[in-house]
Image (cartoon, coloured by chain):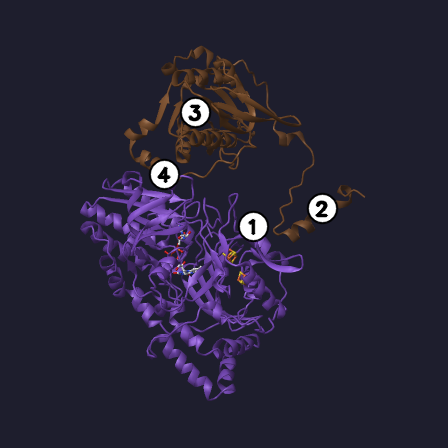
Amino acid sequence: MSGSLNILVLIKQVPDTSSKAGLNPDGTIDRAKAKRMLNPFDRFALQAALHSKKVTNGKVTALSMGPPPAVEILLEAIEHGVDKGFLLSDRRLAASDTLATAYALHKVIQHLGPFDLIFTGLQTTDGDTAQVGPQIAERLNLPQVTYCEDFSIEGGKLHARRIVEGGHQTVVSEFPALVTVANAYHHLEYKTIRGARLVQELQRNEELKAQYIQTITLDDVGADPELCGLKGSPTIVAHTDKVGQIGGRCVMHQGKSIEMLVNEIAAGTNIKEFVRQ
Amino acid sequence: MSDMDKIKYNLLLVGGSSSNLALAHRLIALAKASGQQLSIAILEKGREFGSHIVSGAVSNPHVIKKLFPDYMENGFPIEGVCTESFFSVMGAYKKWDAPRNLMPAEFKKEGYLILTLSNVIGWMANRLKEEVKDIPNVTIDFFPGFSAHEVIYDGSRVMGVRVSHTENPMDDYIYADVTVFGDKGFLSQDVLKNFDLRKNAQLWSVGVKELWEIPQDLSNKVWHTMGYPVLDGTFGGGFVYGMKNNRLTIGLILSLDSPNPDINPQQRLQDFKKHPWIQSLIQEGRLIKYGAALLPEGGYYSLPEKFAVDGAIIVGDALGTLNQRTLSGVDMAMECGYQAAEVLIEAFRDGDYSQAKLNQFQKRLNNTFVIKDLYESRYFRQAFNENPRLLNSYLPTVAKAVDDGNPMVGMLKVGLSNPFRAPFDGLRVLSLFSGTKDIGPVRYKKCHEHIQPDFQAPAMQNGQPFNKDTIYSREDAVFYANTRYHEGNMHIDEFEATTCMRCISRYSDQGKLPPCVNDCTAEVHRVDEIDNVRKHGMSLENCIQCRTCEIVCPEENLRVNPTAQGSGPDFAGL
Ligand SMILES: Cc1cc2nc3c(=O)[nH]c(=O)nc-3n(C[C@H](O)[C@H](O)[C@H](O)COP(=O)(O)OP(=O)(O)OC[C@H]3O[C@@H](n4cnc5c(N)ncnc54)[C@H](O)[C@@H]3O)c2cc1C
Ligand code: SF4
Ligand code: SF4
């Protein structure tokens, strides 16, 4: 049995991929209009953090970086059992790439820490780079366990199983460590009544809310604005293509019933093409 | 467990229902006036308020007017106000609209509101959120996606409910000074049983309903039908409501105290839709949503002896206030909430949550239209129960005459075929309908006790031409109920596997499937043959939580529990 761990989980708010709201005609996203949600990959990180909290009787802090509405996902995290949330929100962070993001977040972690265990999601649905977690680990000089699909905490150490090409790898790490959690990990458990109740209380009581969720700026954590935002981001997006414009033949069959769907497909396609003789 | 750590409220409402939301709306207005401190929690098993609600609904606006005097201007969602209503007898090919002077008064719905109840529920929940912001002495916590799974008692007092099954029991229970059950019986049936309050059985029917988008505008028109496709002696009928934005509600209500072990409500609704009249409406249309739910039909004589116990009140369909004769449940449920609020404000003022105090609710309700109407309609179901000829002989005769183009002749035939019985039957029925004749209390058998395994249903006349694209199998219908379940969901209990095996073999002797398989509205129950043994199996992920199977299981071998985690159908907009 290990002592109580001080756990951090990094989460991000992303545009809701199931909603068409805020989609510009050219395929880019109008973030102000888009519906928002917790990055689906981060749900696994959140579950890993809450599990670690349970087994070590520890505490979980959630940290997010984003515009003010990202407070919503911190509240959501509290519904699931997170103890405290921080939002790094600063105009000067706009257009940060992974380098600038990891820089800013590692400054926050240095400011809030130390933490025994840091969990991040594998990647985000709006960036898909999977770079931020590892970069933070490097900047903090922490051992990193990437693509972690399961783990246990025994004898004061982290025993983790990683997904590697063609199989698994088991690693053991001391604390502190940073773990990027794969979506093969357990699904996020449902929110708790106590958490859902607390969040409603926070929404009624600003003072109490401030005790649970704090919004911080670059200045609060002593981060250099020159290394953040557009200025701190060497990544150049030269140009984007809308996949739908590249071409290819795709027919969407939207039959009203299974029978109609089968008939429709059968009528419209030469099924034999697909059947190996 | 110290009291500090308990999750506790003054008032816990189980179900984001018509009754409970009306209750909360009225209660916080009273608390605003009196300054009474109140903390309220509302549990709703659907992921959103309204997502597990299926109703018609055509409703007398009187209670809504009382609750929201500005309902016509304040955004209260209305699909229309009925301008034309019909009572129609359906043959297999033709429909006959009864002339106005022959039409039973309860089917005249002019001036009534046409509602999408799921939308009304969503609106009422949002409205509560806004209202409570201006009342500093009241808080309401909303818990969509959380079901009450078990009643907690302390001796004879209801203490609250268990909500979840986490590893931390302190997080699983909600305690309250008073718990109000507006849950359509899902959990409150346990309270009634525990205190032996319902001495007579409740009768249930199931309502299946589809929402269509159609080319023509039928808004504000309301049809209620009898006859085809319900000519097997089952009590029931159809409803067709025209709504704004070219939408149409098509539904059937079928009583589950039927001798027929194969009612198959969803497929029966498809038969209804094959009727040339319905075909003419939906030919070029598009199905939007499908759903089903129970209606309590026993009425007056199925009401429990008391409407409250120490620490709890039961309201709405859970209590059984729906009036089957007039098909009004919404205004009844809302009036329950309104009256319960009047009792509760005093209970909280006095800190008295005893049965004696809370059951003032029964006294109050007795003086409202709710119990008065139920009393007047008290023999409505009995009229059909005591005289099966009405449904299995007279109705088919009239329906046949409708197809022959002579409905009036049909009525005459009913009279001539049985010159001694029929007129007598007619008079007796009329006096039972209106409650003017008193025959003393009636007792009902449980629904499943009516089922006859060897029942031979009369052949359904199904020769009408119809557009196949408008007809849906049960598997396909599930898709239109938008079901979604969490991993590991196990919400239906089958108590004894061997009981099912016996039941299956009894029905297969008749060449039939057991009632749970036949009557499920969503392709959940099935018979699996494993190693030559026929067993009962379930595809729970299809379930739309209507509870029909629980009611028709002849062995009382099933229990449909409320699901967890907001799982289940999504009836929003249905
Ligand atoms: C097909 C159909 C057509 C109808 N047509 C009409 C009509 O035209 N006019 C009319 O007036 N009435 C009509 N009714 C009846 C009317 O809808 C009901 O009488 C009325 O809605 C009952 O209200 P209630 O408050 O009892 O519960 P409901 O409004 O049914 O609400 C019950 C709520 O409780 C929730 N719940 C249940 N168990 C739990 C639990 N354990 N934990 C948490 N939540 C729970 C459910 O999810 C649901 O949201 C119709 C009903 C049906 C099924
Ligand atoms: S659940 Fe009931 S109806 Fe179904 S097979 Fe079992 S006993 Fe028969
Ligand atoms: S399994 Fe029971 S509750 Fe579920 S849809 Fe079928 S009949 Fe209704």
Label 4 Cα neighbours within 10 Å, binned few <14 / some 14-19 / many ≥20: many
Judge left or right: residue A27 versus residue B27. right
For label 2, the crowd category at 10 Å Cα-Cα, with few meaning under 14, some 14 to 19 and many 20 or more, is few
Q: Which chain did the renderer colour purple?
A: B
* Residue B514 visible somewhere in the drawing: yes
Question: Mark 2, mark 4: which one is toward the viewer?
Answer: 4
Residue wearing tag 1? B479
x, y percent for residue A14 = 49, 29
Q: Which of marks 2 and 1 is in front?
A: 1
Q: Amino acid type of disc 4?
A: Arg
Q: Write down the residue under mark 4.
A: A194
**Badge number at residue A7:** 3
Chain to which the residue tagged by mark 4 belongs: A
Q: Give the amino acid at mark 1.
A: Phe
Q: Quick check: which quadrant has ligand 2? A: bottom right
Q: Which chain carries label 1?
A: B
Q: Amino acid type of disc 2?
A: Gly
